[in-house]
Amino acid sequence: MKVCLINNLYKPYNRGGTEVVVELIIQGLIKQDIEVVVISTRPFFVKTPLITDFKVKNYYLPSWCYNLSKLPIFIRLFWHLFDLFDFNIYCKVKNILKKEQPDVVITHNLKGLSYLLPKIIKKLKIKHLHYLHDIQLIHPSGLMFYGQEQKNQKVLAKIYQAICQKLFNSPDIIISPSKWLLDYHKEQGFFLNSEKIVLANPMLIPTNFVKSAKSNIFQFFYVGQIEEHKGIIFLLKIFNELIKKTKQKIQLTVIGNGTKLAVVKKMISNNCVSFLGRLDRKEVIKHLVQADCLIVPSFCYENSPTVIYEAFSLGLPVIASRIGGITELMKNSPEMLFEPGNKKELIDKMLWTLINKKELTRMGQQELVVVKDFYLEKYLNKLLMLINKS
């Protein structure tokens, strides 16, 4: 069997959780001796990267999407329209698919790769599975912020959605890690004739790192993009207040990278906050093992954050925003959720963790049992059943 995966980002240009999911699926398919082809993008004026993984055949198509955030808004709007109907990319992918002749195509995020691709997959009569990771088909930014939900009901947004519905039509199977994201697309009229599946994201069995000797400093962690909508600036302000409200020694460690890096570094003014920058998965896990609690303070509607899976795999409890698919992941610990942007509620949750360490440990062990259902081997068996389904 040959499987083609299409995602707008792939190593060495990977950025977030979607790329982690894509990479894990590829690893799982290779272990099953399935031939894998990847179609992705590269910055327009950068040469095709040298990839040493000879078990995967890679195609990198040049795209302007890498420099999009640096362009004026009216140029970005024009690019989004152009990207929907990028016939050049369409032709290139068509030639690749004809050459490789995969048995199935699995698409993920197609921003920067033309939304004409579902049509060519259908035209070539190849089975098509499409993954939902965000709301890119509903709003070009892929983001929806708490308190700003109505922006997706505006005239321009509705026109954009109508175009995306027409171009995507109904792939054979739609896979979403969260019921929330799948339901939101259904409410907007997407994928009327597709089979729709909720399938939580895959994850690797965690590496056995040794936790350091118990410290008298309580360790909070943030792992994610250094962007305002991810709540990191809000969290730093909260943490400074928390320091004044407790006599207990506490530490906040921040891991990640993003456009608000300079702002965040300026806000770190005491020894109670440390910034480690962007780290690979192995290094992130190595540090998370030392944590007492992870904070996910997002202002945007999240699908199914990879970092929460990672925390649960280590038995690490999580405090998170009550938003989007996060509530599904944390159905066993709803008391650890808070209203996005609610300063008092987050401070109260953090103070609670400081004086309820035994309960915190129990929560972590409970999630450790649940997360075993997400391990890659079980996940891949479910995915292969969908691929082989007639």
Image: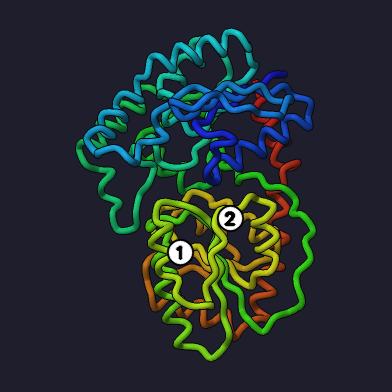
Disc assigned to residue 307: 2
Q: In the image, is residue 333 above or below residue 30?
A: below
First of labels 2, 1 by sequence position: 1
At a point 57% along the width and 21% down the height, the residue shown is 59
Which image quadrant for residue 312? bottom right
In the picture, the quarter occupied by the N terminus is top right
Q: Is residue 90 above or below residue 154?
A: above
Could you say where residue 263 lies in the image, as x and y percent from the top left? 38, 62
User: Which scheme is used to colour this image of the protein?
Assistant: rainbow
- Specify the amino acid type for callout 1: Pro
Q: Nearer the viewer, residue 84 or 367?
A: 84
Query: In this orientation, does residue 388 appear?
Result: no
- Which amino acid type corresponds to the residue marked 2 in the rendered image? Val
- Nearest the viewer among 365 and 300 is 300
Which residue is identified by label 1? Answer: 297
Q: Position of residue 373 (x, y in %)?
A: 71, 50
| Tags 2 and 1 touching, CB below 8 Å | no
Q: CA distance from mark 2 to mark 1?
A: 12 Å
Give me the disc on residue 356.
none
In the image: residue 30, left or right of residue 217: right
